[in-house]
Amino acid sequence: MNKILITGGAGFIGSNLTEYFLNKGCHVVCLDNFATGHRHNIDPFLENPNYKLIEGDIRDLEVCQKAVENVDYILHQAALGSVPRSIKDPVTSNDVNVSGFLNMLVAARDAKVKRFVYAASSSTYGDSASLPKVEDVIGKPLSPYAITKYVNELYADVFGKTYGMECIGLRYFNVFGRRQDPNGAYAAVIPLFVKQLINHESPTINGTGDYSRDFTYIDNVIQMNELAMLTDNPEAVNTVYNTAVGDRTTLNDLVGYLKKYLSEFDEKIAGVNVIHGPNRIGDIPHSLASVEKAEKLLGYQPTHTIEKGLKEAISWYWENLK
């Protein structure tokens, strides 16, 4: 009956974590300001006696202190994502992702929370050309967003060494799955393409489509959060882990998978054309994670390849978008 605080709990990843841990009998506190999260994501939990919603902003230290009261673990997902968003408005991204993160660390320290697990990012690898990406080899950040997520890692490391906290960062690699928002200017590529294809609209690929990503299904991310939260391996704490599958898919291949699986519901989708636009500023060409460290220290075993994950995600989107 652990009590878990999930910041950003009304978001895509946060709401999936909430559902999982409520189903395991945990008490879950959700902290969200609904800047990017959605109330419909948490509607199923509101009547659960083990669920508590705190509507507030991590940029407010008093709100953070209230949220951590009597909490055993924190799964910190709250952030302003999106490289393009951070390029357009670096100040707000920094306020939320750095100042808000620091507030949560301070609140967790003062409340003597057992462990602080936080969403890091593969963007931290920056301009490093090495593949696969291993945790201790990074380059220079390519966007304000990437800088903020790297600063999170630095702060967590300092709080671990200075205050004796237990912190674990999970470098997410292009997470996708149920509840991921297909709408808005900064929608992730998979739900955006799914929505467009369902509507028989041509998706736009930035560049030639040869850029590749380690697309990671939400269930793999849930597994990593649980392992990081509960591990009793002292060597596994106060470090960062790639949270991925360990395989990469080009954008062209991704669209091919989406058209293939969606056309099982609507055969016209197979004939939808693709548009190619310019490369996007701040994007890295290729991303592929090594998950050996997570396998060795946490016992991580990803359950979903991109194809298995896409099949499940598309079934969800078909029921919720059509």
Image (spheres, rainbow, N blue to C red):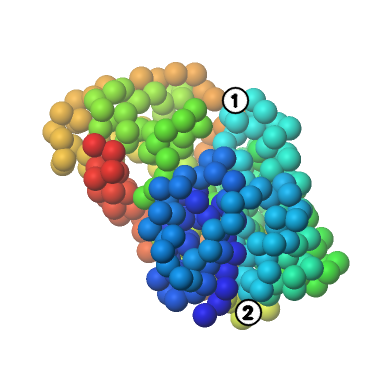
Q: Residue at x 42, y 67 (%)?
A: 48
Quadrant location of the C terminus? top left
Locate residue 162, reporting x and y percent: 86, 67
Residue 17 x %, y %: 47, 61
Please state the total of marks drawn on the protein image: 2
- Crowdedness of circle 2 by 10 Å Cα count: few (<14), some, many (20+)? few
Q: Secondary structure at mark 2?
A: loop
Residue shown at the point (28%, 30%) measured from the top left: 197
Secondary structure under the numbered disc 1 in the rendered image:
loop
Q: Residue furthest left?
A: 267
Residue 281 badge: 1
Q: Is the residue 7 above or below the residue 2 in the image?
A: above
| Residue nearer the viewer, 181 or 235 | 181
Image coords of residue 195 (percent x, y) = 32, 33
Q: Amino acid at mark 2?
A: Asn
Q: Amino acid at mark 1?
A: Ile
Left or right, 199 with reference to 288? left
Q: Quadrant of residue 164?
A: bottom right
How crowded is the residue under tag 1: few (<14 C-alpha within 10 Å), some, or many (20+)? few
- Between 28 and 102, the one lying in front of the other is 28
Judge from the rendering whether residue 18 lies leftward or rightward of residue 58; answer left or right. Answer: left
Upstream in sequence: badge 1 or badge 2? 2
Residue in view at x 83 percent, y 69 percent: 163
Which numbered marker is on residue 233?
2
Residue 272 screen position, x and y as percent:
23, 24
Confirm whether residue 245 shows in the render: no
In the picture, the disc for residue 143 is none
